[in-house]
């Protein structure tokens, strides 16, 4: 619902640069233009009205830092017409009506994921088959389990070269890692979990800046290298020539191995695709972080959430809400969810242009000493003559005023007043001054002078002899009074 423009302007706060907010127990504390120390903040009611001087064309809304991947300030803007000058129209309409009678962080560094190869101590000198079995024993992919145990049970010398198994092991360890592995923290999913955990724990602009600086060097680039290595390994497995790997008498094992590895490649290609999506999502998050930081001040630990362009013809209404963010790593993908339906309303800020002089349309009732002469006749020496007038008192006048209020942002504000009012036959004109109150709203008291038209003798004078009363009536003409009456009363503004 639109507020009364005059009462809003008189009660609003003047701001030149910014309104700064601190969130305390989901209630807003605000401070204007000055020191952002929390001790100077005041608690905000449901709505805060501010006015901006005409020489300033923009005002910022800022907050103490909130991690945008945990909680986000949502500001939406609506507008309504600035009704300040509508008062002029109302006043002129009232004149027109009466005149007819006259004529709107950082996180911990992540190790590089160097895909593994099996290390053998010098002197072991294992056979090709024993080397291959040692490698195969360490595989974890579900699609390899049945084949793995079948392979390990083989007694004969089937494997001639172990290179295929080294590549298989490197690929397997990129996608499937046993919980007891020493380097489990280097595993792709764990790296992502570490990253998201660290990101969600950044609690200041400086920590956010530090974390953003680490995103490429400690997360995105190593992960891209890991994906690239896996890509090379998958390609090698896909085009592998099994002829030189297995003994000619082990065709069954060779064919079984090829079939199992082909299925394995299908599985890891699906995971590989998801990892590429994750990296793309990380790059989006990095870009969002960098963009967010352009609106932050690390010295004050603050962030700008909106910039409001001031318009003399509109009231800009900023609705401020708090939204919770869920950033998770699930099913090998990063999910970033926001539920607008659960936004919590924190308050509204109404931004409008500052007016030193506020026009206001008002109506009221006034006491006045206005009087009207009533001429008659008398008989003198048997002749009809003009008698001295008898004055009829007209003590109460109703009027429509244009109040020109000096905006002191005070309980009491001085004003000038122009108006048109009722009178006995033709309208009256009023001019004066008074006091406009901020509280109670809409109310003012005023006083001044009043002019109106009344019937006065034109050519005749008192005691002039006339033929009859018709001569007197024809001589009476409407004249604007030169000596004003006074008025005093109460106004109600619109």
Image: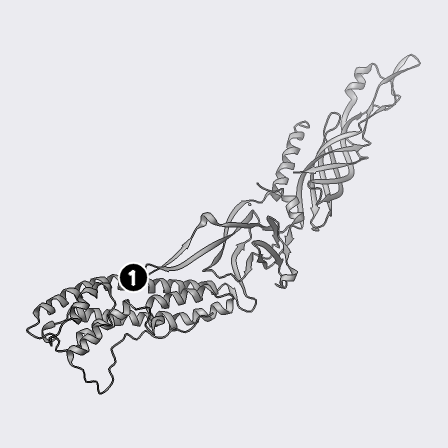
- At x 46%, y 62%, the residue is 292
Query: Looking at the picture, how far across and down is residue 446, in whole percent?
Result: 76, 40
Find the residue positioned furthest to the bottom: 123
Q: Nearer the viewer, residue 425 or 294?
A: 294
Q: The C terminus lies in which quarter of the figure?
A: top right
Q: Secondary structure at mark 1?
A: helix
The image shows residue 92, relative to residue 212, as above or below, that is above
Q: Is residue 459 left or right of residue 347?
A: right
Check disc 1: other Cα within 10 Å, few if <14, some if 14-19, many if 20+: some
> Is residue 398 in view?
yes
x 39%, y 59%: residue: 328
For the image, the number of numbered tags is: 1
Q: Position of residue 437 (x, y in %)?
A: 72, 44
**Taking 490 as reference, is 234 left or right?**
left
Looking at the picture, tell me which residue is in the foreground, 14 or 425: 14
Residue located farthest toward the right when viewing the structure as drawn: 381
Residue underneath mark 1: 274
Q: In the rendered view, tell whether residue 417 sits above or below residue 143.
A: above
- Residues 44 and 489: in front is 44
């Amino acid at each position: 619902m639109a507020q009364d423009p005059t009462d809003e302007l008189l009660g609003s706060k003047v701001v030149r640069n910014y309104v700064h907010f601190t969130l305390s127990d989901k209630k807003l504390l605000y401070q204007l233009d000055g020191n952002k120390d929390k001790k100077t903040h005041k608690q905000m009611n449901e709505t805060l009205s501010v006015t901006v001087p005409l020489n300033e064309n923009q005002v910022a809304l800022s907050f103490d830092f909130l991690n945008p991947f945990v909680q986000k300030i949502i500001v939406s803007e609506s507008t309504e017409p600035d009704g300040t000058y509508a008062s002029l129209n109302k006043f002129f309409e009232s004149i027109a009506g009466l005149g007819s009678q006259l004529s709107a962080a950082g996180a911990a560094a992540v190790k590089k994921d160097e895909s593994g190869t099996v290390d053998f101590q010098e002197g072991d000198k294992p056979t090709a088959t024993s080397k291959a079995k040692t490698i195969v024993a360490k595989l974890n992919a579900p699609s390899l389990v049945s084949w793995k145990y079948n392979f390990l049970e083989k007694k004969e010398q089937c494997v001639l070269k172990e290179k295929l198994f080294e590549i298989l092991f490197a690929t397997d360890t990129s996608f499937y890692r046993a919980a007891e592995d020493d380097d489990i923290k280097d595993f792709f999913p764990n790296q992502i979990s570490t990253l998201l955990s660290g990101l969600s724990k950044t609690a200041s602009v400086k920590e956010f800046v530090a974390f953003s600086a680490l995103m490429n060097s400690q997360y995105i680039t190593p992960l891209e290298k890991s994906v690239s290595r896996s890509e090379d390994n998958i390609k090698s497995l896909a085009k592998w020539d099994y002829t030189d790997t297995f003994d000619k008498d082990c065709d069954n094992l060779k064919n079984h191995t090829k079939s199992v590895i082909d299925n394995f490649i299908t599985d890891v290609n699906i995971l590989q695709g998801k990892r590429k999506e994750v990296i793309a999502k990380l790059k989006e998050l990095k870009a969002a972080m960098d963009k967010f930081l352009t609106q932050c001040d690390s010295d004050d630990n603050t962030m700008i959430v909106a910039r409001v362009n001031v318009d003399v013809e509109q009231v800009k209404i900023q609705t401020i809400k708090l939204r919770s963010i869920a950033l998770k790593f699930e099913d090998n993908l990063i999910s970033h969810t926001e539920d607008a339906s659960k936004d919590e309303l924190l308050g509204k800020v109404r931004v409008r242009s500052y007016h030193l002089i506020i026009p206001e349309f008002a109506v009221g009732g006034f006491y006045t000493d206005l009087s009207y002469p009533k001429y008659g006749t008398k008989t003198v020496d048997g002749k009809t003559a003009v008698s001295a007038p008898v004055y009829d008192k007209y003590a109460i006048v109703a009027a429509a005023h244009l109040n020109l209020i000096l905006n002191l942002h005070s309980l009491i504000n001085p004003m000038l007043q122009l108006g048109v009012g009722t009178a006995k036959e033709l309208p009256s004109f009023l001019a004066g001054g008074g006091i406009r109150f901020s509280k109670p709203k809409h109310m003012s008291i005023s006083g001044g002078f009043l002019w109106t038209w009344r019937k006065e003798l034109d050519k005749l004078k008192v005691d002039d002899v006339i033929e009859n009363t018709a001569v007197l009536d024809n001589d009476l003409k409407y004249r604007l009074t030169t000596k004003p009456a006074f008025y005093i009363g109460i106004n109600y503004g619109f």
